[in-house]
Image: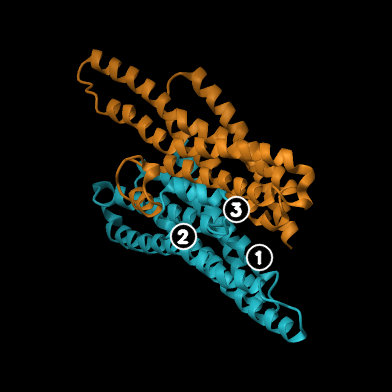
Chain colours: A orange, B cyan
Amino acid sequence: MKLIDKSCTEFTHALSSKAAVPGGGGAAALVGGLGAALAGMVCNLTIGKKKYAQYEEELKEILRKTEELQDNLLKMVDEDAENFLPLSKAYGLPKNTEEEKLEKARVLEEALKIACEVPIKIVRTSYEAIKLHEALVDKGSKLAVSDVGVGVQCLRAALISGQLNVIINISMIKDEEYVKRVKEETDHLVAEGTKTADEVYRKVEAILS
Amino acid sequence: MKLIDKSCTEFTHALSSKAAVPGGGGAAALVGGLGAALAGMVCNLTIGKKKYAQYEEELKEILRKTEELQDNLLKMVDEDAENFLPLSKAYGLPKNTEEEKLEKARVLEEALKIACEVPIKIVRTSYEAIKLHEALVDKGSKLAVSDVGVGVQCLRAALISGQLNVIINISMIKDEEYVKRVKEETDHLVAEGTKTADEVYRKVEAILS
């Protein structure tokens, strides 16, 4: 059974247990999925309203994108769990001889890069979803503006949590070129993404007060 | 069927739809529940480990508390949906005569206070769960410290989202004494809670780098 097919209660209980999955990465992906879904909700509550007719086409396009980002984030919950398996296996390899040590280091390096894949995607996708909320704070129904606020808070959490799971893995990766490239990309997206999320949130607060 | 018994996928899809529930409040409660669950995971991964034996009793007490906060937050997902019903009903009341207008205003005021209840509890409970993570960053297994980081990010999002849902409701409540009391309490908890969450997160980052 896929993790994402568990009920919200079961998923939360599994998260709190000592089982290896779901872990922080899976939780981040789910929270990101909820943040993207809130952008979808705002589109669905705005499309068809006369007052926002001028944005109709744009809103339909934003809705299409949020659905894609949401589904991708939900898929990452199980993908992250699967990508943890090679790493868990690599840790168990023997290192009694010089040959075994070299082989373990090689397999571990590869497994760490695999474990990094989903966290990097969580950062990228959460960033993109925050940008969609940025458009919605101006073009979405004002009646749903608090959902933009909750959405960017969820995505901000997912973005930073994704980065944290990147950091854990790259701290053990030896390939300096890879580490530099991943660190630069994710640091940039997190800096820009949190800045945008905070700006959007302040706009929501201003509209509501 | 309870919202919280839906699969994670179904819940997310329902959130993105134009249906009245789940809304931002329910999403905030679930994200808070996930944040509390991560504190439980850290306890479960630490309890029984020799290296942390000195914290054993304290960790068991933190685990008991996280489980309580987690279950309370999960319950709030459906409670928030139920508490929206009187408000939705009140909006539909007629206001053709002076008498109807007065009656509608009275019912609306009461319904707004009911709709405020869960968001206030989300703020309180997320704040408490952040305080538990604050203890865990020092006393939990270092191998699970990234889960403390993800946990505080989720709870920070739930805390602020809870407040936003308080703001929406109190902006329409006439009872000034009530508004002042609720605003003071939640503003204080959000200021303290985000400060603590950010401090805990910086500690996590420092440990990982």
Circle 3 crowding by C-alpha within 10 Å: few under 14, some 14–19, many from 20 = some
* x and y, in percent, of residue A34 in the image: 52, 47
Asked if residue B67 is positioned above or below residue A68 in the image, the reply reads below
Q: Residue furthest top?
A: A99
Q: Residue furthest bottom?
A: B99
**What label sits on residue A96 in the rendered view?**
none
Closest to the observer, B204 or A181: A181
Query: Mark 3 highlights which residue?
Result: B18
Q: Give the percent coordinates (x, y) of residue A196.
A: 68, 42
Q: Which-is-in-front pick, marks 2 and 1?
A: 1
Q: Image quadrant of residue A170?
A: top left
The residue under the point 58% across, 59% down is B20
Return the chain for callout 3: B
Where residue B167 is drawn, which disc sits there? Answer: 1
Q: Quadrant of residue A62?
A: top right
SS for callout 2 = helix
> Where residue B160 appears, x then y in whole percent?
59, 57
